[in-house]
Amino acid sequence: MKKVLLVLICVGLMSVASAFTITNGDFETGGGENIDDVTGWYDLSTGSFWEGAWQTNASWITANGTNVVVLSAYNTVAGDPLAGSYLYQSMGASAGESSVMIGFDWGHPDDTAAGRIDGITISVLASDGSFVADDAIDVYGAAGVSLLDSASYDHVALGTDGEIFPVEVTLDLSGANAGDEIFLRFNSYMPEGGDPWPILDNISIVPEPATLVLLGLGGLLLRKCK
């Protein structure tokens, strides 16, 4: 009986960090030079390639030598951090989590001239289940969807290659109901005086410190379970 209980505890602890998932966060699946449709994500599609969001490993664009996403300046509004070219995906259903920590890299394409101000916004939204995701249909502002939290970043380009920066941000999920579908969204953001064409890469869910402790305990218990 003791061994059975230990196994159940181990399984429970190891599942703590797996409530949400991100598909193709590094954009390597389906990657190539200027791919219009971002694999695994819903994105802005206007019928004009340069107005949308696309993934690319073009040498004059990628700042880290791998596939990145470019978010165009189309539809940005100065001072409105949630207006702009976007992409988003579902991370799964809420199980009552109070927050989620997201890590990502963002910055400037390698062909950006010095002095340009690029901006990007990350947000999380909750759907009551009535929203049907698709390309060219934005989750932000849709019926049955509420904005939970967002964070915006901007940077003045130096005009050098390799300008891409790691970010970790904790986003508040307390406004969601258990069972709500949680969406993760990124969009280009126009700071005052900006003309944003940011790049995005390496999106992941970062375990909270308390979760890491629990996983460590889970590892100890797993050894006892054997």
Image (cartoon, rainbow, N blue to C red):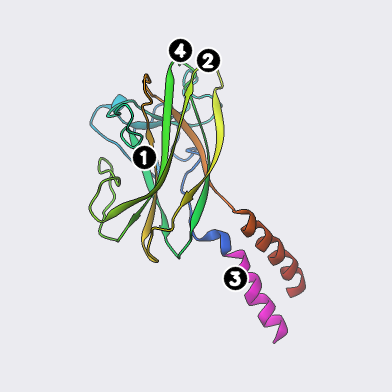
Mark 1 lies on residue: 87
Circle on res. 158: 2
Q: Secondary structure at mark 1?
A: strand
Circle on res. 12: 3
Amino acid identity at mark 4: Ala
* Direction from residue 9 to residue 202 in the image, left or right: left
Name above or below for residue 180 compared with residue 183: below
Is residue 4 covered in magenta?
Answer: yes
The quarter in which the N terminus is drawn is bottom right
Q: Secondary structure at mark 2?
A: loop
Q: Main secondary structure of the magenta part?
A: helix
Residue 45 appears in the picture as rendered: yes
Percent position (x, y) of residue 9?
Answer: 64, 74
The nearer-to-camera label among 1 and 4 is 4
Residue 226 appears in the picture as rendered: no
Which one is nearer the viewer's eye here, 159 or 54? 159
